[in-house]
Amino acid sequence: MLTFPAAMLCTSGLAAEARIARAAGFSTVVGAGDRDRTTALVENAARQANCLVSFGIAGALAPELRAGDVVISTEVVSDAGRWQAADAFRSRVAALAAGIGAIEGPVLGALRIIASTDEKRRAWVETGALAVDLESDVVARIAASAGIPFVVVRTIADSVHRELPPAALIPLAEDGTPNLARVLASVVRRPRQVAALCGLARETRTALAALVLPARALHGLVAAA
């Protein structure tokens, strides 16, 4: 395994996302979609970091984004406010994004999963954010409080045209893995969602595979720090 300085802390919701960040040599915390848990973990771990990263997959809000597209951002918006990294750091992130063909633009940190196509389109119009996840606003807020930079590194799993089925909205287990018993129970109750679940699973695999390159590229930010 590669080992880099423990200056950069990645925050993920899924165990699968965290494995990719750790394989690239970065310390990672897994919030499992629980915002209170995520906040506590990041606040504690951020004491040893000089840069925070919101790392993982995301839902698209911009209509042109597709599964596997990479979004890198130093701007986060939420119901509670908007955060931007300092100009000098943003320039370094822009160079990193250009180097790997990533798309730059604001990211929405949401209180809950945005599941419907109508909600996604409305969020895009109202916020201008390219993508949405559950961790980025937590990361940005804590970074601002600590006086350290942050960056969002996300790959698209579900496009704006993908309506998320009920089983996809079931909370994760505490370790960031799917709650398989509850997912299965949901499928039994609503078997018509199987096709949508299979499509989402395929897109999620594409998004996770696309995370490997930006995870490695983050070393450039560490080296320049």
Image (cartoon, rainbow, N blue to C red):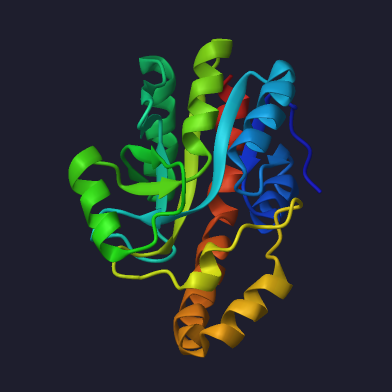
**Residue pictured at 58% horizontal, 19% vertical:** 225
Q: Is residue 195 above or below residue 55?
A: below
Residue 5: image quadrant is top right
Q: Is residue 60 left or right of residue 16?
A: left
Q: Looking at this view, is 166 or 104 the one in front?
A: 166
**Residue pictured at 67% horizontal, 46% vertical:** 21
Q: Is residue 116 left or right of residue 222?
A: left
Q: Is residue 102 above or below residue 187?
A: above
Q: Is residue 49 left or right of residue 103?
A: right
Q: Residue 64 placed where, x, y %?
A: 24, 61
Q: Residue 163 placed where, x, y %?
A: 36, 70
**Residue pictured at 69% horizontal, 49% vertical:** 18
Residue 38: image quadrant is top right
Asked whether residue 115 appears in the rendered view, the answer is yes
Q: Is residue 120 left or right of residue 158?
A: left
Taking the view exactly as shown, the residue that stands out farthest to the right is 1
Q: Residue 194 placed where, x, y %?
A: 51, 86
Q: Is residue 12 above or below residue 199?
A: above
